[in-house]
Amino acid sequence: MSLSNGRAYLAIPGPSVMPDAVLQAMHRPSPNIYEGELHDLTASLIPDLKSVAMTDQNVAIYIGNGHAAWEAALANVLSRGDTVLVLVTGLFGNGWGAIAAGLGVQIETIDFGAQSPIDPDRVAAHLAADTEGRIKAVLAVHVDTSTSVKSDIAALRAAMDKVGHPALLMADCIASLGCDRFEMDAWGVDVMVSGCQKGLMTPAGISFVWFNAKADAAWGDCVTNYWDWRPRIDPAVYYQYFAGTAPTHHLYGLRAALDLIKDEGLDEVFARHAQLARAVWAACDRWGADGPLSLNVADPDSRSHAVTSVGIGSPLGDTLRRWCESKCGLTLGIGLGRDPADGYFRIGHMGHVNGHMIMGALGTIDAGLKALAIPHGSGALEAASQVIAEG
Ligand SMILES: *Cc1c(COP(=O)(O)O)cnc(C)c1O
């Protein structure tokens, strides 16, 4: 018998759960795009987008998903024939590198595997060997969603500074913004990209590029009029924010989402994600005490607070996901980019999630392990609820 009727929970690492406040804000007729409320609302987003990234610099909005922001960021600072260093901790590092290659940029890659963060010392050694200053930018993914590996971006900047390399530091925070602490200015990040459908809780369709004066000065010949970030941050007329018609309803939705973050407080948002993540890890540790299940990332400091990748052996990742969805209405993330993909699943715990949702997701997984007779250690739910019970 299926128990899936009721409110479904999409526990994948983006798109994330949409708050009712976001849905309600979007449920409205098209606004006047020439003047009035929409113009004021758009202007009001800019300071709040800068605060979630902890920057006083610039932010440009693009109509497009995270891939669009990847391309926009690169196109504005690079010229054909330039070289970038791509740091890979999962599928998304390679994805961003492929966008650079498509622009006619040379890529050098350091691959840290699927279970470890960026090693700043290896990056420093690579940059130190670049005595001609060939490398124009370093591309780092803060949280790689495919592996749930989180890297220390401040330590990466420190390593770049130690060897005195002038490359721009570009960070992908698509999976981490509004979930894991990220401080663009304090950490010395020159360019940062994110999307709206993960920690920012808005349906997929708009994305953002934050950049500082150093990045703006790098300006390269890859950029075309549409992707140029300058008119978007300083529009002489309203349509230049978006190089065309505004994504009207996304803007209303995003306004509501940023208000939720503001009302809760960014530090509280980070703390909530951290505690919920610890509950997920506590359950996984107990399940893994017996049987095939294990957390993908061993060191808690290198684990995302927004998504958790779990190895369980092929084909049990898919078997368990299917059971959770059809039996209980819980959709888990696939083993994206892993080999074999059906040996993994991912739990998305980003954005609009709270204690009872996480306990429900963990309870469902626990029931799935039992229903499918997958060997597992006991006490997972008790361990998770102990974490939830902390202050
Ligand atoms: C989701 C994601 C992307 C891609 O974003 P799309 O909106 O799917 O284009 C890139 N990088 C990271 C880290 C992501 O989590």
Image (spheres, helix red, strand yellow):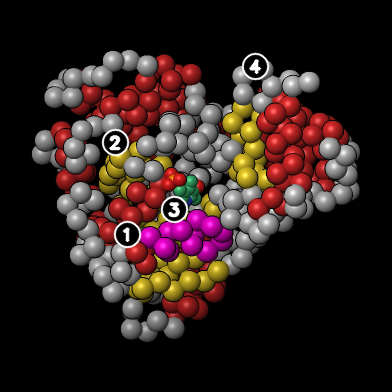
Spatial distance from mark 4 to mark 3, Cα to Cα? 35 Å
Mark 3 residue CB less than 8 A from any atom of ligand 1: yes
Q: Nearer the viewer, mark 4 or mark 3?
A: 4
Q: Identify the image quadrant of residue 118.
A: bottom right
Residue on which the image places disc 4: 6
What amino acid type is highlighted by mark number 1?
Leu
Mark 1 or mark 2, which is nearer the start of the sequence?
2
- Marks 3/2 in contact by CB < 8 Å: the verdict is no
Q: Quadrant of the N terminus?
A: top right
The label shown at residue 46 is 2
Residue on which the image places disc 1: 74
- Marks 4/2 in contact by CB < 8 Å: the verdict is no
Residue on which the image places disc 3: 172
Look at the picture and state if 162 lies above or below 103.
Answer: below
Q: Nearer the viewer, mark 4 or mark 2?
A: 4
In the image: residue 51, left or right of residue 180: left
Note whether residue 299 is visible.
no
Q: Which residues are magenta?
A: 88-99
What amino acid type is highlighted by mark number 3?
Asp
Q: Nearer the viewer, mark 3 or mark 2?
A: 3
What amino acid type is highlighted by mark number 4?
Gly
Spatial distance from mark 3 to mark 2, Cα to Cα? 19 Å
Mark 3 or mark 4, which is nearer the start of the sequence?
4
Image coordinates of residue 22 in percent, x first then y, are 43, 22
Task: Tell me which secondary structure the magenta stretch mostly adopts.
Answer: helix
- Marks 4/1 in contact by CB < 8 Å: the verdict is no
Mark 2 or mark 3, which is nearer the start of the sequence?
2
Image coordinates of residue 308 in percent, x first then y, are 65, 45
Mark 1 or mark 3, which is nearer the start of the sequence?
1
Look at the picture and state if 96 lies above or below 79.
Answer: above
